[in-house]
Amino acid sequence: MTTASKGLLIVYTGDGKGKTSAALGNVFRALGHGWRVLVIQFFKGDWPIVFGELESAKAHPKLEILQLGKGFVQAMGDKKPFTEHKNAARDAVEIAKQKIYSGDYDLVVLDEVIYAIDYLDIRLVELKDVLEIIEKKPAHVHLILTGRNAQKEIIERADLVTEMKEIKHPFQKGIQAQKGIDY
C-alpha cells in the first residue's frame, strides 16, 4: 500500500451526467500508481445488466467494486419495498465503515452515496453516518463521494468539489442509456 501525504475528500455533484465517470477516472489513475482501490455503489446492483466497470475490475487485482444497492428507488419500474432499499443502504454504510477504517485502501469511492442521503425525498442513509466516515477515515485514504445535491456539511469538509451541470443529455431525445457509456 502506498502512503499519501493527505487523503483528500473529493465530491462530484450536480445534475449533469459524469459524476461516477469522473470518480472512475480517478480510480484508474490510482490503479496506475499501484494503489489499492475500493468502490461501493449505493444504487447499482440487483439489475439484470452487465456493468462495464465490474468487467474491468476483474482484470485489476487491486480494485474491488461492491454493488450493494437494490437499483433505483421508486423509479424505473422499481417494485421493491422501501425497507429493502433502506436495509441495503444501511448495510452498505456499515461495510464502508469497516473497509475504510481498516486502512487497507488508498482510494475509496462511495458512488451515489449523496443520492442515498436525500434525493427526491428518498432518504436511505443518514448524513451523520457519512460525516462520521469522513471524520474517522485514516489520514492517508482519499475518499470520493458522488451524487446530486451535495449537502453543505459535506461541501464544507471537502478539499475538492466539482459540480456537473447538465447542458444537454441524450435522454432528452429519447435515447436510452448506452452500453459502454452509461454502464
Image (cartoon, helix red, strand yellow):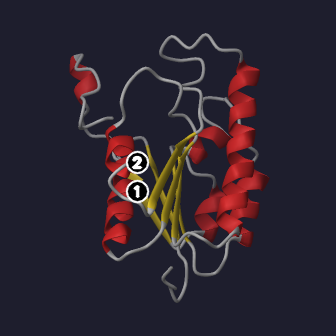
**Which residue in the structure is indicated by mark 1?**
23
Is label 2 in a helix, a strand or a loop? helix
Residue drawn at (76%, 62%) of the image = 132
- In the image, 42 versus 98, the foreground residue is 98
Residue drawn at (63%, 60%) of the image = 154
- In the image, 146 versus 37, the foreground residue is 37
Amino acid tagged 1? Ala
Pinpoint residue 63: horizontal percent, then vertical percent. 44, 58
Pinpoint residue 178: horizontal percent, then vertical percent. 24, 28
Locate residue 72 relative to residue 153 in the image: left or right: left
> How far apart in space, not on screen, are marks 1 and 2 (Cα)?
5 Å
Residue drawn at (71%, 62%) of the image = 133
State whether residue 88 is above or below residue 54.
above
**Which residue in the structure is indicated by mark 2?**
20
Q: Quadrant of the C terminus?
A: top left
Pinpoint residue 143: horizontal percent, then vertical percent. 55, 66
Amino acid tagged 2? Thr
Number of numbered discs overlaid on the protein picture: 2
Residue drawn at (51%, 79%) of the image = 1
- Asked whether disc 1 touches disc 2, contact meaning CB atoms under 8 Å apart, the reply is yes
The answer to which image quadrant residue 29 occupies is bottom left
**Looking at this rendering, what residue extends furthest in the bottom direction?**
5
State whether residue 175 is above or below residue 28.
above
Is residue 17 among what the camera can see?
A: no
Is residue 154 among what the camera can see?
A: yes
Locate residue 171 relative to residue 110 in the image: left or right: left
State whether residue 124 is above or below residue 154.
above
Locate residue 154 relative to residue 160 in the image: left or right: right
The answer to which image quadrant residue 137 occupies is bottom right
Is label 1 in a helix, a strand or a loop? helix
Pinpoint residue 167: horizontal percent, then vertical percent. 26, 40
